[in-house]
Amino acid sequence: MPNNFDLSNLALKALAPANEILYDDKGLPSIMVKIPKMTYAQLGLGASTATHPAFIVNGQEVDAIYISKYQNIVQNGRAYSLPGQDPKTSINFDAALSACTAKGAGWHLMTMMEWGLIAQWCKNNGSMPKGNNNYGKDAGDSVYQAIPTSMDGANIGRVATGTGPLSWSHDGTVNGIWDLNGNVWEWCGGIRTVKGELQILANNNGADGANPQTAASAQWMAIKADDGTLITPDGNGTTSGSVKMDWVSSACKYDTTISDSAPGAHGCTFESVNCSANIGDATKLLLQALGMFKYDSTAGAYNGDYFYFNNAEAERSFYRGGNWGHGAFAGVFLSNGAPRSSAYGSIGFRSAFVQLPTA
């Protein structure tokens, strides 16, 4: 970041004093929200004072991560977080990843571990954000509407980044992260399924562009169901004792095997996702850290957010949040998956930054 007096930073601090402008290695700006290191307990995920995995990169803790305040645009192959923009869409997973890592060391596609962190913060602090999930408005609002940037037939589709009301911010203030609920889906790094087997990069290693997320990457690890440790997958989605996504009684059920008689695309409410007795407490905590499993079992605690997955396909990458037409199903706990090659007008992304630890 430049050390000289910067009028852009001065203007930002006047409007959103807790935000920062970070510059990539070409000296070009993005508006970012700093998230300081937190423990599980601080996020309402039990009593553990251990650091949330989003703040562990390459085995070392970092003091903070920076999340794009806005869904990103792309200029000259690089991702930027700027207000009042039509977010970049029709971009596949690998292209979104590349647009982020092209910005320099520490820049990366927002990971599932980071998304889970933010989602749980919202839940724990009673600030589940609204957003453009009902053609320019939130399904729960009849008045507030953001600035349109595209149309879906006769209805509003995408809206300009950050132009909704404060209720569309993750913390309900001008300092928050905008549009996590609706507008466009957002690719998330560091996670995938292989024929229903859940695979991740360790902790938040997806924040380091040097850790490949290609289909053939050796960084992908399966999750041992009984204790949450990471194990080398067998390549077929059938790793012994690993966490897999089964479909039982019309809901996703984490288990070590898949008994689903018709594997494929499924969907249920987030709060109905459950675990078999084979899933240990440490594994549940890891799934909760990823924002992939509930912590609160109170009926309606997740606002009807939906959970889609596919336990048949060779690989599925994940995106979250929903788009402009998902209505009450959209939200910070809404999840879906698609081939990494998918590039639709309803899928975008968001970059993040971390100061990579040195050896």
Image: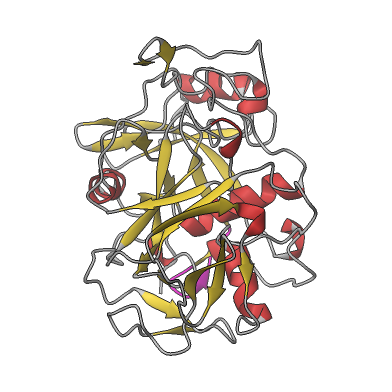
Q: Position of residue 156 (x, y in %)?
A: 44, 14
The part of the image, by quadrant, that contains residue 249 is bottom right
Q: Please report the residue visible at 48 percent of the width from the left and 27 percent of the height from the top.
A: 325
As displayed, is residue 112 above or below residue 28? below
> Is residue 200 visible to us here?
no
As displayed, is residue 89 above or below residue 341? above
> Is residue 51 visible to us here?
yes
- Answer with left or right where residue 78 lies relative to residue 336: left
Q: Position of residue 117 (x, y in %)?
A: 60, 54
Magenta-drawn segment: 57-63
The quadrant of the rendering that contains the N terminus is top left
Query: Is 62 colored magenta in this rendering?
Result: yes
Q: How is the image coloured?
A: secondary structure
Count the numbered circles shown. 0
The part of the image, by quadrant, that contains residue 208 is bottom left
Q: Please report the residue visible at 77 percent of the width from the left and 41 percent of the height from the top.
A: 126
- Answer with left or right where residue 142 lies relative to residue 69: right
The part of the image, by quadrant, that contains residue 288 is bottom right
Q: Nearer the viewer, residue 202 or 280?
A: 280
Q: Please report the residue visible at 45 percent of the width from the left and 19 percent of the height from the top.
A: 159
Q: Nearer the viewer, residue 45 or 193?
A: 193
As displayed, is residue 1 above or below residue 179? below
Q: Position of residue 311 (x, y in %)?
A: 39, 66
Looking at this view, name the residue that lies furthest to the bottom. Answer: 240
The quadrant of the rendering that contains the C terminus is bottom left
Q: Position of residue 147 (x, y in %)?
A: 48, 11
